[in-house]
Structures are given as structure tokens and as C-alpha cells.
Image (cartoon, rainbow, N blue to C red):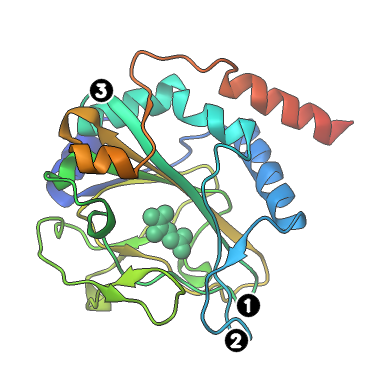
Amino acid sequence: MSLRQAQVDQFLTEGYTTVPHFFSEDEVAAMQSEVARWIKSGMFRDVSTNPEVRQNYQLIPLYPRSRLFKALPFTPKVIDAVGNLIGHPVIKILDQSFYKPPHSGMGTSWHTDNAYFKLRDPLRGTAMWIAIHDGDKTNGTLKVVPGAFNEDLPHTRDPASDHHIYTQLDESRAVHCELEAGGVVFFCFGTPHATGDNQTDDRRVGVGIHFVNQNYMSSLQEKHWEQTVLSGEVASKSFSSEVASILAQADA
Ligand SMILES: O=C(O)CCC(=O)C(=O)O
């Protein structure tokens, strides 16, 4: 699964691109099973400041808690795609998940990842947002503002969350990235993005993994963020064998 040139061009000019069905049906089933385990065992934490009304459950980081998600970034199709967008050497600096329960799941407010990461070139870092379940407007799928990655957007503390920051944006600029489960959105660190409330009867979960071209990290950033080198590396246990093992457990 390599990216088409049009997708790379879209990322470089608009700051994002979408890839439907990036992950196979089996990979999606294994990811959904892993996420169901996290939910069942109460691993997510609600970051909403008004939890009686709406909840926004976050789990961060993922790699110490899941062999599947620890192996996922080492999959050749992930390293290839990310390398095509931001250049090698690719490192992973963060992974996290957001779970939106039915009806009362809350969106995450508009922000850019560079408001946190402060990379000197916003196109040299990308998030890979994975739709673990089908995502559309009604369940608050990821939305982005195209072509805005160089805008200087002031961020302040988000009153809806116990630790996030946010920026104010005109909703009419938003593109809703509607994707079936297993589709991904790549968006660079400068791209404003948000999610919406989940108004449906079903849960919706997304996983976000953040990558940087190592040549663009400053020593300050190196101290703050995880630095898992991916380019040229192979995972000790591969993503495909973790997928097989989870599906075998589900069948047993
Ligand atoms: O899923 C969400 O609510 C927020 C997603 C996000 O901001 C991210 O993955 O970077």
C-alpha cells in the first residue's frame, strides 16, 4: 500500500491526505478487539471537564499497553507512507487513542499538533489518524482545515478538557474526513484539526500516531518526546503476527 503521487502532493500543498482502507479487514478486526479490551478494562481516562454531560476518553501512550500497537508503526506500509510524506529518517514520538461513547461522546476542540510539538517545519511531522470504527459527521469523525498549516493560530487552555489547548476556527473551513474503519488521515503538524460529538448509538474510536523526520528535531524536543526510530528497523514481533494472534484468541 504505497501512497499515490496525488496523495503526497495533497499533503504537501493542503497539509493532509486521506487513504481509505489503509488497513486490511483482519487488521481492523484485531485493532477493534484491542480497543474493546482497553474499554472493558477501564484503561481510558475521561478528560472532559463536564463528565456528567459529555465524555472524551483518552488513552496515552499505547505502545507499553499493546503489543499490536507497539508493532504497528514498524509495518513497512506505514514506514513507506510516512517516509514519502515527511522524508526519512522517520521516528515515532507519540501514540494515543480517543474513545467517544454513544450519544454522549465529546469532540476534541480545534488545535494544531505543532502548538504542542513546535517543530520548525510543520511539514516534517505528521499524524496518522486511524479510523478504528467507521467515521462520519454524525459520530464526529476527524475534521481538518486544508491549506492552513502555515497560519499563525493562537492557542489557549481549552475549558472543555482538563489538559488540552485549543484555537478558534470558522467551522465553514472544515473538511470532514469520512472513512470506513481501517482508513487513515495523514495531516501535518501545522494542520488545524478537531473531532465532533458522537450523536449515534455506537461507540467510535480513533488512534493517532505522531511521526517526525529525525533531522528536524531540536535537542529540546528530543528531551520531551519518545524517539522510536522506524526507518530501516524491523519490529521484534511483526504487526501481522500480532494480528493473527489476536484473531486466534477471539476465535478460541
Ligand atoms: O480523536 C480526537 O478526539 C482527537 C484526535 C486528535 O486530535 C489527534 O489524534 O491528534
Asked where in the image residue 143 lies, by quadrant, the reply is: bottom left
Q: Where is residue 168 shown, x and y percent of the image?
A: 24, 78
| Front of the two marks 1 and 2 | 2
| Quadrant that contains the N terminus | top left
Q: Is any part of residue 213 visible from this angle?
A: yes
For label 3, the SS is: loop
Q: Give whichever of discs 1 and 2 has the lower sequence position.
A: 2
Asked where in the image residue 73 lies, by quadrant, the reply is: top left
Which residue is drawn at the image coordinates 52% and 74% (left, top)?
Answer: 106
Which residue is drawn at the image coordinates 70% and 24% (left, top)?
Answer: 244
Query: What amino acid is labelled 3 in the image?
Result: Pro
Q: Name the residue under label 3.
A: 89
| Mark 1 surroundings: few (<14), some (14-19) or many (≥20) residues within 10 A | some
Task: Work out whether 11 lies above or below 42.
Answer: above
Task: Give the Cα distance between marks 1 and 2.
Answer: 10 Å
Tell me: is circle 2 under 8 Å from ligand 1.
no
* 129 left or right, relative to 231: right
| Mark 3 surroundings: few (<14), some (14-19) or many (≥20) residues within 10 A | some
Task: Tell me, for residue 103, which label it has, or none.
Answer: 1
Task: Please state the quadrant of the image where ligand 1 appears.
Answer: bottom left
Q: Mark 2 points at which residue?
A: 53
Query: What amino acid is labelled 2 in the image?
Result: Val
Q: Where is residue 241 shown, x and y percent of the image?
A: 65, 19
Task: Give the Cα distance between marks 3 and 1.
Answer: 42 Å
Which residue is drawn at the image coordinates 37% and 39% (left, top)?
Answer: 93
Task: Give the Cα distance between marks 3 and 2.
Answer: 44 Å
For label 1, the SS is: loop
